[in-house]
Structures are given as structure tokens and as C-alpha cells.
Image: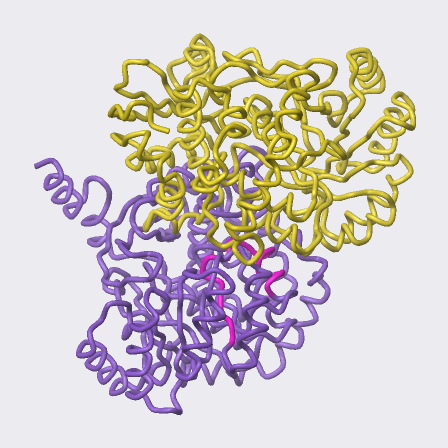
Chain colours: A purple, B yellow
């Protein structure tokens, strides 16, 4: 995949603390102030392409992720892109199993978020050099090449490379038609912008009315802080959208296992398709218990935005702990690890409904889910991608939503690149936004 | 527990990168070069006591942990120790559920290692101000007060506060006698210093002979890199120690699930008591599968040194995935979270055999396991604490091993304090050791 075998040197630069304001509140994340670690890979190739990688946080913590990016940087600096993607599995393993850094993970938390940022930049660069949007790079890629990007370590008891090959081979059938379908109609989305916690009736009504006018048919409500308030907001929204449209609920890890079952039993009358993150993201068996109790009430369990790696996803699938699987392009080890999760989900026939929002997540995950439909799942049943309407203005290739669907990006790359002026303005600590904030703090 | 209600202000200082050399190799951690983040809490109380907290890494990564310590520091700076320990559960929750930082965890990886370092310092300070070694502070503490240090969030489906209270009440019976027993004979230990990977027959024989002469009766061998080499070393050691003494094996996460079962079936003839970390530390169901296959061969599964929080331990117990539970005082959220794990292990009657080694881990975990015996488990059956013979010379209150047992520390505190000259020499980047290293790198 190396164009003309030219030598390429990478130069990683991490820009921490781009502070992007967005209004949203969640039961367990009450004061988010989105921020992102932004990795820029430069090369010595004449094409001048750069790879941009991102992972966001809720504010504090980006400086820690940036520190981890720097600790990983030596793995990518002065490497040839052709060598990296020629043994992408090996390169992934190098980053995630660094003999010393692995101790502070492995493959979880800060160091894995940093891995995502670095690898997202590599994928962006690769797609740009191939002149394709990332989803198309994946769709066109030979199945064996695709598999060579995946580290199957710790998941072979559930998915071997040969089984994965079988899935991808089967996915070739009807691929062209599904690609046409995507280009024509896009991938169905749902909106989380209507019903954050703490909104008044009037705000809810107004946002909901607007969303209905814009063609949205699937809505997510945040729950878990106060049962009576949840009942009020869920009733209002269900009444607004009518019985046919889809309602989902999201508790952002608020409950213990017994509490999750009890609370959701009381919200069952509003017919939610799923309850998202009912408890600790680490609690596979807890999610299984909750699923077992709620599925008979018609409520599925959804989780994944804080599942830290493929080993957790593997077990959630094994334990029948979820009915909807939510990948995240900035928490897992980039496209490489997400590919393994898409394939495992396919094996278990569990629909993937990506997590989006944050900073740039919509821009990234759309590529993965469009690839998933065209080459892996071949189905839209019970599938949709989250959409949150904020911070897109900072991206050079923002998402295009038409009739409540993600339209496939046409520009080359992974849509990770931010606008120069946004980066300049929000860069820590020298950006204009930060200078003002820091000056205000000092006064 | 606040002595005289005096105002205490904490001043956190994190010292990153104390670089302590020790020779050890593990299958998946091939080039460790121990390093530690070291937190010092100073107060404005006349007693002049300082709290020292530590968490180590295998080298690179300590700078990332130190960065996370700084991100957490505002939670402890200028706080009153009495207020902290008066609502220790609340303080623990404040650190682990910081509305923004929780995104880069929660309760796992870098940010949780940093939490451990900060809280270890608080416990050291508290024990010093009470004039007791930490184990004794715990043993003498009223059960209700002990429970008020524990965050039961996400574990109430397995252990409620009332159940935990019942366990502690039962633990009061015979406590005095067990304390006398500990002071007289100490807590049984095993050694990992004899059989790291790559040792020649001669080295193995010599180390083993010396260990036998020193009274050691329990030995751990590193396995998983090469089956034939494992057979050679296991045979040699089993022959040296005879059939009655205890042999354990440690694979440091080397295998996938099917491989673990296959490999260990071939080492079963050497009668290991346990196989430690056969696969990914996140793979609860994988460990359960391995346990199910190996227990009939007389081999238990041990894990825990990289279990990142109580939610994972809860599930390992629920799933019958381990026969030996290995707590770690620097990876879990300090004493607070370890208390919850000790209590859950007691409920499931699974023996706790702490992980030690690294930097200062022996010094710390001895306190926890001595408390466990006196106040919780009341049993030594199948129980022992790891011992690794390195880096103790850097500690002000190093462990005392007598007849292969940890003798209870008598000095006040958590034994976390390092010698001033060691810190000075190894501090990054100004310590003598680092100056030399950095100069050599630049030449």
C-alpha cells in the first residue's frame, strides 16, 4: 500500500487542550468542558499530506493523555508509512504492548486513549495517501489485508482469523449495491441533542418540535439522576414523538445492578428501545443480569462508549450482556481494534450503534459504521449511529446529515482534521481562548 | 480520628521517575526498569509528619502517572486530614468520580494508579498521626469506621455494607490471639526471586539452594515464553525442592485462553499450586474457562496484579474465575478499595495472596494481608504473600523477613517512605543517576 515506495518520515506533534465549549450534562459527568488531544503526523513526502488524530476528554485529563501520546511518540517517529501499514498488526502490538508502558494499561484508560489518537492519525494519513475517505479505503481493501490490521490476541477463543475471513468473504456479496444505497440515502442516525438532564418542559418541547421538523425519528433521553424528573421528561417526549418513533434512554453508569433493574422497570411504560450504560462499564456480568431482567420488558441493554478494549466487548457478547453494541473511535485502539469488534458483533449478530458526540466523534465513527454496513453486517435492522449537534464547526470536513442520516464523506481521510483557526484559537496554553481564561483565573 | 481537631493543610508534591534498577524479566514485560511516582503530603501541624504515597511502573509511564497525580492534586491540597478520613468514602468518590477526569478512567489505568499514590500518602499520614503501623490502625478501627472508608458503588449486588459489617463483626472473634500469632511468627511468604526467565541451570540451582537454606518453602517460576525451557526449569526446581514444597507458575498474561489450557496441561506434571495471569487481566470469562479446565488437574488460577478495580475482582469471584486472589496496593485505589476486595474474597472464601515486588510493594501489601488475617479471613490455609528481594534498600522502613515470613512492621505509617538520599539520587531529572543517564544519552 506504499505509493511508489517513497521514504516517509513521521513527525508527531501533540496539541493538547483544545478547549471547545459545548452544552451537555450527563448524570455522572456533570461539568463537561470538551477538550481534545490532537496528533499531527507530518511526513517528508512531496504530497504534503498530514495525518490528524484525535481523542477527546471532558476537560481535565487531556494534558495526561497528551503526556501519554508523547510517551508513545517514539514508536511512530521516523517510521515509513508503508512499513507501518504493511504490518499494521505488528505496529498495533508494538504500541499496545510496549514492554514498559503496558504496565500503565494494558490497553485501557489514558494510554489507550493516546494509542487511539496516534493510530487515528496514521489511518487518516493512509486514507489521504490512497486518495479515499476512510470508509472507502476499508470497503475496497482486500479481506486478507484488512485482517492483517487486527490484533487477534486475547479474542481467538471467540473469533479466529479464519472465521473473520469467512465473515468478510460473505460480506463481499451485494457490497456494490449496499455502497450505492449508502451514497444515495446515508446511514440512519439518532439524536441526543433534545433531552439532556435539567431541561425545562418548554426547552424539551421546542427542541423536540425542531427535531421532528428536521426529520428525526429516533431520540435519546438522559436518565438516572432523579426518577420523577425522568418520568416527566420521558412522558413528555414520548407524547411529542408518538408511539411509533424510537426512544432510547442513557444512564451514563449511574446505577448499581439492582437499582438499574428497579429504575428501568419504572420507565418501561415509555417503551425505550434500550437503556444505555446502566452501570459500571467494567461490569460484564452486571450488564448480563440487567439484560436478563429487562429484555422481557422489551428493553435492550446498550453499552460501549467506555468499554476500554476488545476483551471487554468479547465478554459482553459471550455473556449476552448487551443487545446493542456501541463502539467508540477514540477509546478503542483506533480502526484496528474497532474492526475486531465489528467482526465479533457480526458473529453474535448484535447490532452496532456507534457512540458519537464529544469532539469529532461523529466525524470519525460514521466511517466505521458505513464500512460495517457495506462489508460486514449488511443490515440496517435495529441499527443507527448517534448524532450530537455540536462542535462540527471546528472540523475541516464536518459530517453531512440529510433526512436524519449520515451521508458518506467524500473527502480523502478520516475526517479528523480540524480547522487551522480553531486549533490556533483553542491550543493550550497559547491559544486566544486559553489566554483569556488563564488571565481571568489569575485576576 | 482527628487528633485535637487541629487544622491540617496538605501539600502534594509528586516526584516522578525515581529510577531504581532491579533485575527481573517476565514474558510480557521484557525490559523493566522500575520507576515510581512518589507523592509527599506535607501539613501545617507541628508534629511535622508527612504522608508518603507511591505507585511504581516498569520505567516509561511514570511521567504520565505523575501528570495524573498533578491533575488530582487539587482534591487534596489545603484539605483537613480529619475531614478527609471523617468521610473517606466521600473523598475516595471525589477522586475516582471527578466529573471530568472520570472520562480518562474510570477507576483504571493511569488515573487509578495516580489515585493509589495519592491515597497511599493519605493513609501513611493518618497512620503516622495515630502513631500506629497501618495494619494496626486497621485492626483497631471500629468496624463502622472501617466501612466508612469503602465505596460500595457497583458492588452492592455482591456485597452490601450490612453484609460487610457482619463479616467484620465475626472477625472480632479471636482477633487478639491472631494478632499475637502474627507478632510471634509473621505472615507466610513465598519467593519469586529464584526463577525468572532466562536463568541458566547453574543460576537456578544456586538461587534455589540459597533460598532453601534461608527457609523458603514456596517458590514461583515464570513461564510462558518457551514451553521446552519452562519444562527444563520447572523440572529442575521441582527436583530441587522435592514433592512436598509448593511451586507456583506465572505467565504474565502471555496466552490466549485455549493456549493457556494447552500449555498448562503440559506443565501439570510439576504440580503447580497455581498458574498466575494466564491471559488478559480483563478476561473474566476467559479466566473462568481456564479455571474450569485446570482445577481438575489440581491447578488453580491466580490473578489480580493488573486487575484494575473492585468491579473486575467482583466478577472474577462471581464467575469462579480464580482460586487465588492477588491484591495490589498500588493499582487498586489504595487501602479503601483493597478493603472492599478483602471483604468480597472472604464472602466467597477465596484466599488472598497479595502481589509484591516492583518498588515498595512488599513494604505496602504486608500491612493489608496482616490485617486480613487478623480481622477478616482468620485463616492461613492456602495463603501467602509474594516476596521479591529487591529495592528494599531504598526504603526507610524496609520489610523484615524471618523464616520466610513477613514480620509485622512496628513503625507508624504505611512503610511507604523512601530514604531521603535514595529519592535525591534517583529523582527525575535532577538526581545524580538521571543526570548521568541523560548525559550519556546526549553523547
Tell me what residue is drawn at x 64 percent, y 17 percent.
B183
Residue A277 rendering spot, x and y as whole percentages: 45, 64
Q: Residue furthest top?
A: B421
Q: Is residue A234 above or below residue A261?
A: below
Q: Residue furthest front?
A: B173
Q: Quadrant of residue A98?
A: top right
Q: How many marks?
A: 0
**Is B320 or B148 nearer to us in this picture?**
B148
Quadrant occupied by the C terminus of chain B: top left
Q: Quadrant of residue B205?
A: top right
Please report the bounds of the magenta region as a residue range: A300-316
The answer to whether residue A78 is visible is no
Tell me what residue is drawn at x 52 percent, y 69 percent.
A325
Tell me what residue is drawn at x 29 percent, y 23 percent.
B4
Q: Please say whether residue A301 is one of the residues in the magenta stretch.
A: yes
The answer to whether residue A327 is visible is yes
Q: Please say whether residue B221 is one of the residues in the magenta stretch.
A: no
Q: Is residue A268 above or below residue A328?
A: below
Residue A268 rendering spot, x and y as whole percentages: 44, 80
Tell me what residue is drawn at x 29 percent, y 51 percent.
A35
Quadrant occupied by the N terminus of chain B: top left
Q: Is residue B205 above or below residue A326?
A: above
**Is B250 or B50 nearer to us in this picture?**
B50
B279 left or right, relative to A96: right
A151 left or right, relative to A399: right
Q: Is residue B259 above or below residue B374?
A: below
Residue B68 rendering spot, x and y as whole percentages: 38, 37
Residue B357 rendering spot, x and y as whole percentages: 62, 25
Amino acid at each position: 500500500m506504499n505509493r511508489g515506495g517513497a521514504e516517509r518520515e513521521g513527525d508527531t506533534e501533540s496539541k493538547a487542550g483544545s478547549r471547545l465549549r459545548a452544552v451537555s450534562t450527563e448524570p455522572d459527568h456533570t461539568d463537561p468542558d470538551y477538550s481534545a488531544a490532537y496528533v499531527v503526523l507530518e511526513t517528508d513526502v512531496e504530497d504534503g499530506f498530514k495525518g490528524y488524530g484525535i481523542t477527546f476528554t471532558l476537560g481535565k485529563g487531556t494534558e495526561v493523555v497528551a503526556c501519554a501520546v508523547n510517551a508513545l511518540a517514539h514508536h511512530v517517529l521516523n517510521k515509513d508509512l508503508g512499513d507501518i501499514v504493511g504490518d499494521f498488526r505488528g505496529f498495533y502490538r508494538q504500541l499496545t504492548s510496549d514492554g514498559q508502558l503496558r504496565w500503565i494499561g494494558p490497553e485501557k484508560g489514558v494510554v489507550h486513549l493516546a494509542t487511539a489518537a496516534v493510530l487515528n492519525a496514521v489511518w487518516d494519513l493512509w486514507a489521504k495517501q490512497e486518495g479515499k475517505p476512510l470508509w472507502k479505503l476499508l470497503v475496497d481493501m482486500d479481506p486478507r489485508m484488512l485482517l492483517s490490521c487486527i490484533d487477534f490476541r486475547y479474542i481467538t477463543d471467540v473469533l479466529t482469523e479464519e472465521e473473520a475471513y469467512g465473515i468478510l468473504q460473505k460480506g463481499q456479496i451485494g457490497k456494490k449495491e449496499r455502497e450505492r444505497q449508502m451514497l444515495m440515502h446515508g446511514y440512519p442516525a439518532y439524536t441526543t441533542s433534545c433531552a439532556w438532564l435539567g431541561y425545562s418542559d418548554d426547552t424539551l418541547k421546542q427542541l423536540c418540535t425542531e427535531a421532528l421538523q428536521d426529520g428525526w425519528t429516533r431520540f435519546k433521553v438522559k436518565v438516572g439522576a432523579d426518577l420523577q424528573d425522568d418520568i416527566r421528561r420521558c412522558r413528555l417526549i414520548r407524547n411529542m414523538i408518538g408511539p411509533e418513533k424510537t426512544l432510547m434512554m442513557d444512564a451514563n453508569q449511574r446505577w448499581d445492578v439492582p437499582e438499574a433493574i428497579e429504575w428501568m422497570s419504572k420507565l418501561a411504560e415509555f417503551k425505550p428501545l434500550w437503556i444505555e450504560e446502566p452501570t459500571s462499564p467494567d461490569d460484564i456480568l452486571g450488564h448480563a443480569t440487567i439484560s436478563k431482567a429487562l429484555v422481557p420488558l422489551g428493553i435492550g441493554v446498550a453499552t460501549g462508549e467506555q468499554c476500554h478494549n476488545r476483551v471487554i466487548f468479547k465478554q459482553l457478547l459471550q455473556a449476552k450482556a448487551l443487545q446493542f453494541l456501541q463502539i467508540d473511535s477514540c477509546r478503542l485502539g483506533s480502526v484496528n481494534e474497532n474492526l475486531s469488534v465489528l467482526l465479533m458483533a457480526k458473529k453474535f449478530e448484535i447490532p452496532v450503534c456507534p457512540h458519537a458526540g464529544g469532539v469529532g466523534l461523529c466525524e470519525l465513527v460514521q466511517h466505521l459504521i458505513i464500512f460495517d454496513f457495506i462489508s460486514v453486517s449488511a443490515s440496517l435492522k435495529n441499527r443507527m449511529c448517534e448524532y450530537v449537534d455540536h462542535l462540527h464547526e471546528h472540523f475541516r470536513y464536518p459530517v453531512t446529515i440529510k433526512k436524519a442520516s449520515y451521508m458518506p464523506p467524500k473527502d480523502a481521510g478520516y475526517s479528523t482534521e480540524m480547522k487551522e483557526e480553531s486549533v490556533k484559537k483553542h491550543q493550550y496554553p497559547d491559544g486566544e481562548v486559553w489566554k483569556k481564561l488563564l488571565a481571568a483565573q489569575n485576576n
